[in-house]
Amino acid sequence: MTDKSAGFTLIEVIVAMAILAIGLTAIVITINNGVKNSAKIKTRIIANQVAEEAIRDPYRPEKINMLNKSWYITYKQQNTNNNTIKKLTVSVTENPNKKPIVNLTTFQNPNNQ
């Protein structure tokens, strides 16, 4: 007598390997997305720090180097309904031809600086 239930058939092995491959692919994609998002968050945090420093020092040059990267700062000052208060928007980008990574807005009294 031979026992036919002693092992796995070829079909069962192929199905198990396909399921394993799909699972591993999903894990790799998830890790890859996490790494990409981490890099984006790091860039936004640094750009935000550059913008905060630019607001504190409005005479800062429009291109600075921070953490081995060049950052481009754009200042936009607008009038408000109150003549003594100005709206200042600081935009920061890694490339002057791309849209800003961070826009930071504050209100200032230019006479009190």
Image: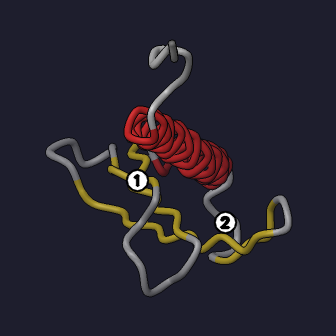
Q: Quadrant of residue 42?
A: top right
Taking 20 as reference, is 70 above or below it?
below
Front-most of residues 78 and 73: 73
Asked which secondary structure carries label 2, the reply is loop
* Residue 7 vertical placement versus 101 (above, below): above
Residue occupied by mark 1: 103
Q: Position of residue 38 (x, y in %)?
A: 60, 42
Front-lying residue, 1 or 58: 1
Q: Which residue is pictured at 65% across the width and 53% down the height?
A: 50
Q: Which mark is drawn over residue 28? A: none
- Where does the image place residue 17, in percent across and percent down from the top left? 49, 40
Q: Is residue 63 above or below residue 44?
A: below
Percent position of residue 66, x then y: 80, 61
Residue 99 visible in the shown view: yes
- Whether residue 113 is visible: no
Element under label 1? strand
Of all residues shown, which one is farthest toward the front?
Answer: 1
Q: Give coordinates of residue 71: x percent, y percent.
A: 65, 70
